[in-house]
Image: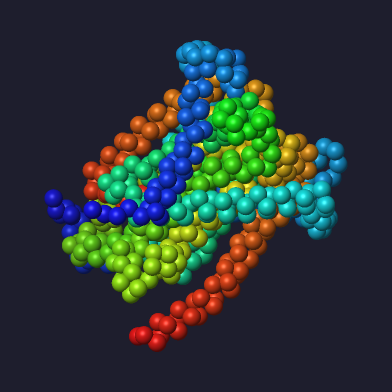
Amino acid sequence: MPLHSRSHQKKYARPPRRVKLPSFFLAIPAWAWLFAFFVAPVALVVWFSFGYKPGIFGTHANDVLSLDRYAEALSPTFFATFQNTLWVGVAGTLICLAISIPFAYWLAFKAPVSRRGVLLAMVMIPFWTNFLVRTIGWQIILAPNGLLSNGLQSIGLLDSPLEILFTRTAVLIGLVYNYIPLMILPMFVAFDRVSLPMREASKDLGAGRWSTFINVTLPLAKPGIIVGILLVYIPLMGDYITATVLGGAKGNMAGQMVANQFQTAQNWALGSAMAVVLVLTILTTVVIAALVSWLATWPVRARQRLVLGGTS
Amino acid sequence: MIRTSFTDISLKVWAVIVFGFLFAPIAIIIFYSFNEGRLLVSWNEFGLGSFATIVTKPAITNAVLVSIQTGIIASLIATLLGTMAGVALARRAGKWAPWFLGLLILVTVTPEIVDAVSLLPWMVFLGQDVGLSVFNDGIVRLVVGHSLFSTAVVAYIVRSRLIGIDEKLEEAAADLYAPPFRRFTQITLPLVMPAVLAGGLLSFTLSLDNTIVSAFVQVSGTTPWPVYVLSAVRSGLRPEIAAVSTIMLLLTLGALALVAFVLRRAGDSATDIAKTVGGG
């Protein structure tokens, strides 16, 4: 089939290489959409955070601007929740990392190639069940008279019912479960990109399995691992639904605090300040983690750079 | 004979454990959907009663329908906007591109609860103060809330797919006098189709699962399924919820198989599909 009809040929005497439209033309709709429903509302919330709650019935007022809501959001009662959230967020991400690295490695290098697609789809299956419903599944498993508890007791590993539900451990299990596919997937893609010849070359040069993994595979897969960490850490910090189902009264997360201020306490100014603090906490910890890992690996990188320079 | 080392075996054992972990709660939910008891979490006896009850409760079917409807519209919007943005980023990146990419990253790193608390006052403002009554509609609110994150995700996926494809194909079409729109529909679009499909599917799933934003922006009467379940968590869970989940899981698995089939017909290997979905 010809790509053009006669009328088009007449219209375009010369190849239309340069279009008059600006280069960002195709991005305009997305830009406008995100501006109207993301930038503007978030800016509004940032503006609310400098205001105050004017009375029992008002939700926010901005005639006097101050940083008082931030001081309130960081007062001891609320600060403890931020601390708890940060602890859960960091611990959850680290556990996901510890589980995902060997698993994604196996999937990329050891699993049978023909079945890889099915195995990947199986990793995604939790995602096709509702987030809340699978968390409820954990509630059934972890209950003191539930399956895990009874099973462990019957094989004699436990003498009394399992007291894990409505603790921070249960919240951690649920969070790791809910977000781990988001880490496995990009990590698999990253490992998969590290070509076999590259790893074989490392082995030919005398490096063992472990040394190849540390010095070749892992550094090459770094971008994917970073994406995985961010994809898990950020939603984990904002999630409070998992904590509501599995943590009971002990499942205090910052997201719940923000939600409470908007839904129950009707203090939008304080809720906004908390939301801003939450975002800042996430950004700061990500920057700190990046700096720390950059500094920690600096001696290794410096040494490897020298080796490479010497041999070339 | 290939020697199987200790590391290989332990990696395999680990993989089996991880799969067990991933499937445990889902298996439990499917099993408990046959619970005849009054409460979901306390097992009584085996039966199909919960599946029969679904039909008699309009609130449940209504919630599922709202979710599906929202999912379809939100994923269509996100796919349309995201594909256009992704093509622009890959093919026409100018000085604006880093800024736009920055905005997309900002959308992705903002926790859902922040989106939720920002959208609620904004919708009230647009619907009541500005007088755009369309924003008082439940479905519209949900669609807007669900489309934001997905738009960014689709844009990433489409961009990374196009960056991996040589632009010479489009240039050849231009040399053959194909006008820009035609070039887009006949060359660029077929090339990015796997990414568009993967992005659309991901958007639909994210929308079906969206709880936090939905709980904030929803209007009574258009309660989506996750918000219905959330309220049930507070008031007492009944086996029907597990039954609906079992049905929905089967339906999504069917849809997934269909998409995988289409993508495979289009010539992508399973790993390529995963790479596309994973944004690689």
Give the mark count: 0
Residue at (49% x, 66% y) in the render: B98
Determine if residue B153 is in view: no
Q: Position of residue B113 (x, y in %)?
A: 63, 45
Q: How is the image coloured?
A: rainbow
Q: Position of residue B133 (x, y in %)?
A: 59, 35
Q: Residue furthest left?
A: A1
Q: Position of residue A37 (x, y in %)?
A: 57, 48
Q: Position of residue B260 (x, y in %)?
A: 31, 41
Residue at (64% x, 57% y) in the render: A282
Residue at (63% x, 47% y) in the render: A238
Q: Is residue B280 above or below residue B79?
A: below
Judge from the rendering whether residue B102 lies leftward or rightward of residue A103; answer left or right: right
Q: Is residue A145 above or below residue A1?
A: above
Which sits in the foreground, A245 or A169? A169
Q: Residue furthest bottom?
A: A310
Judge from the rendering whether residue A83 lies leftward or rightward of residue B271; answer left or right: right
Q: Residue furthest front?
A: A156
On the rendered image, what quadrant is the C terminus of chain A found in? bottom left
Determine if residue A191 is in view: yes
Residue at (75% x, 42% y) in the render: A261
